[in-house]
Image: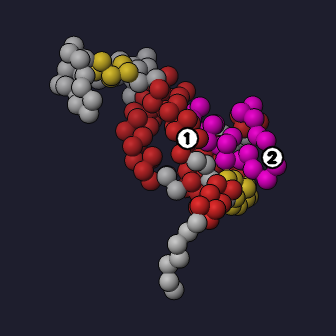
Amino acid sequence: MGERLLSMQDILSGKDRIVQVFIPALEGKVSIRALGLAEIAKAQGQAVESIKITADAPLEKGSVPGNAKLDFTMKGLIIAEAESQLMLAQMGLSCNGANWRLEDVKAIRPASAIKQIADEVLKVSGVDSEVAAQLQPFRELARRATTDESDRDGIQAD
């Protein structure tokens, strides 16, 4: 089968892509839409917004000096990650005429369904592996925070 040249209309039609995905926590399927890069950036920015990098000397773009310190609270990181998942689920579920509000998404039970929906939205949007890989270190810190309250060098925990 030959490859065809896509028109602008062909490319932009992907913005309306809606799929049904199975959510194990809900024991059923939901309709979600693919998100654009700006929407994903807005939601995923929540996960790292509360982290500040400081150093005794000015930081140059792309460099991290040996004296750099991460300044954040575990509580802030966990809340930021939850807000990111809520936003992804809210934006992804808002399709087929449904206009989900954050309050609606917060009411979903069990709570694990929200994370599953957010993960599916990223997959449908085609950025799950890239974004997840970039954010994995921060998510791992948040997970460890719930089980390990000890201070680490350069990291200030609640």
- Above or below, 31 against 59 in this view is below
Q: Marks 2 and 1, how far apart in space?
A: 21 Å
The part of the image, by quadrant, that contains residue 87 is top right
Residue at 79% over, 41% down: 99
Q: Which residues are magenta?
A: 81-103
Residue 65 visible within the image = yes
- Above or below, 144 against 15 in this view is above
Residue at 43% over, 20% down: 73
Tell whether 65 sits left or right of 19: left
Tell whether 137 sits left or right of 12: left
Residue 124 lies, in percent from the top left, at: 59, 57
Instruction: Read off the residue under disc 1.
Output: 38
Q: Is 22 in the magenta?
A: no
Q: Residues within 10 Å of mark 1 (few under 14, many from 20)?
A: few
Residue at 26% over, 33% down: 62
The part of the image, by quadrant, that contains residue 135 is top left
| Amino acid type assigned to the residue bearing label 1 in the image | Ala
- Above or below, 58 against 110 in this view is above
90 or 143: nearer the viewer: 90
The image's mark for residue 98 is 2
Q: Is 101 in the magenta?
A: yes
**Secondary structure beneath label 2:** loop
Residue at 62% over, 65% down: 10
Residue 81 lies, in percent from the top left, at: 52, 33
137 or 56: nearer the viewer: 56
Residue 33 lies, in percent from the top left, at: 67, 53
Tell whether 138 sits left or right of 110: left
Residue 153 visible within the image = no
**Secondary structure beneath label 1:** helix
| Amino acid type assigned to the residue bearing label 2 in the image | Ala
